[in-house]
Image (cartoon, rainbow, N blue to C red):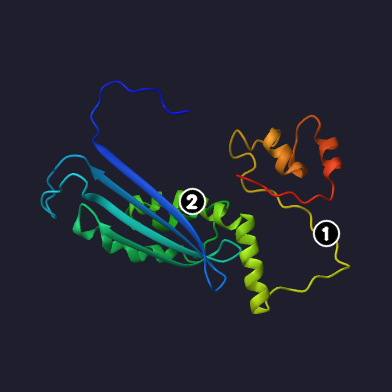
Amino acid sequence: MPLSPPIGRQHLHTRRVVCQGFFRDDGLWDIEGRITDEKTYEHANEWRGPLKPGDFVHDMSIRLTIDHTFTIVDAEAVTDSSPYRMCGDIAPAFRKLIGLRIGGGFHRAVRERLGGVQGCTHIVELLGPVATTAFQTVSSKKARDLNRAHREKTGTLPPKDPNAAPKPPRKPYMLDTCHSWASDSEVTKRWVPHFYTGPDAEAVRAAVEGKDVEMEG
């Protein structure tokens, strides 16, 4: 359902954030984000001169390369458009992200390394949706299939141990992060019943014991 019809108004500003996730030929993952800002009217910029409607006030991008543990192994940031000449000078500082793991405490660690004058406000802000894009990319069945095929091709997939005990299911990263993924919701009950906490949780878990389900979301 769309938003309700607005009252009369004038469009002044547009911000766009686009994030994409890629599986690389070397078995790693590239997560890229781009943020742009533009005005609908001409305005002056002391450094760049007059900016026409649609000219980017900000156009900044970042690429994080991560491994299967969500650890950042490479980082590259660029500034293609900015209101001040010196904005792009800070882009190399984003290599400080190398070694961080996307997960609990990630945003706090980012602020410690790149907060305030140590970084760029817009690229730091962009790291929020980039991080969630990483989870959306790596957690899909398609991604797991690509990763397994690569490991089989390169001989890095460990052989199965027929005597090994089955691994317990891992807690999904999205559990209790929103209304739909509350631990007692119908979504959790359907897709990750092992972590369901509703009133019929015991019966639900017993009914699906040993069943592998594919998550959505």
Coordinates of residue 4 in the picture (x, y in percent) = 40, 23
Tell me where residue 197 sits by quadrant.
top right
What kind of element bears circle 2?
A: helix
Relative to residue 125, is residue 71 depicted above or below? Answer: below
Q: What amino acid type is highlighted by mark number 1?
A: Pro
28 sits to left or right of 78: right
Tell me where residue 3 sits by quadrant.
top left
- The residue lying furthest to the top in this view is 7
Residue in the foreground of this view, choosing between 63 and 151: 151
Q: How far apart, in angstroms, are the residues tagged by discs 1 and 2?
A: 33 Å
Tell me where residue 190 sits by quadrant.
top right
Relative to residue 99, is residue 46 depicted above or below? Answer: above
Question: In the image, which is nearer the foreground, mark 1 or mark 2?
Answer: 1
Which residue is at 52% across, 50% downward? Answer: 132
- The residue lying furthest to the bottom in this view is 155
Residue in the foreground of this view, choosing between 121 and 135: 135
| Disc 2: which residue | 107
| Disc 1: which residue | 166
Q: What amino acid type is highlighted by mark number 2?
A: His
215 sits to left or right of 1: right
Coordinates of residue 191 in the picture (x, y in percent) = 71, 43
Which residue is at 82% across, 37% downward? Answer: 204
What kind of element bears circle 1?
A: loop
